[in-house]
Amino acid sequence: MTRNEKKEWLSRAYHLDRRIRAKMRRAENLSCLATKASGISDGIPVSTGGYAASRLESIAVRLADLSTEIEKDNAELTEITGQIRSAISSVGDQTMEDILEMRYLDMLKWEEISAMMGLSVDYTYQLHRRALEIVQVK
């Protein structure tokens, strides 16, 4: 596997995490819509017609489906994270493993990683490249 293919494989958790966060934002927006469609104004129920009830039902169904998707994605993220941790542990050098964990599991930026490690950004890149050559992905 090439270095770029390994980077992509290790980045799976990052990409899935972004999708989960986007779905959570959509769920929050749907919850706000549901509150508006429910006919409650300042805690006081307001008469709603058939359209509002139908709209509320549609929002509730979409929100339930989205919740199910988020749960499945979270389970997949847990599995992927375990696979990535296992691959990272194959490197055999604690500094390089720390860099890979911070980058691909903690999702930190290069500047943050180098500051936390007490290394220059360039040296962090160099160790990252070496770690990618060593890491065993499946």
Image (spheres, rainbow, N blue to C red):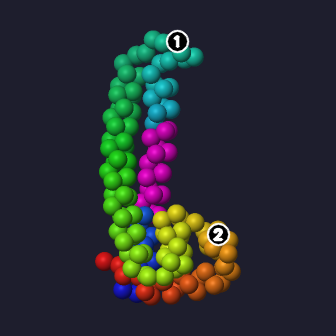
- Which residues are drawn in magenta? 14-29
State the residue in front, 41 or 114: 114
- Which residue sits at x=48%, y=12%? 45
State the residue in front, 86 or 80: 86
Q: Is residue 78 above or below residue 119?
A: above
Where is the N terminus found, in terms of image quarters?
bottom left
Labelled disc at residue 44: 1
Which badge, 2 or 1, is on the more N-terminal residue? 1
Disc 2 to disc 1, how far (Cα)?
Answer: 52 Å
State the residue in front, 92 or 87: 92
Give left or right: position of 105 versus 138.
right
Q: Is residue 43 above or below residue 80?
A: above
The picture places residue 94, in percent across and down from the top left corner, at: 50, 78
- Which residue sits at x=38%, y=37%? 63
The picture places residue 40, in percent across and down from the top left corner, at: 50, 18
Residue indicated by mark 2: 116
The picture places residue 23, in percent across and down from the top left corner, at: 44, 48
Give left or right: position of 134 versus 108.
left
SS at circle 1: strand
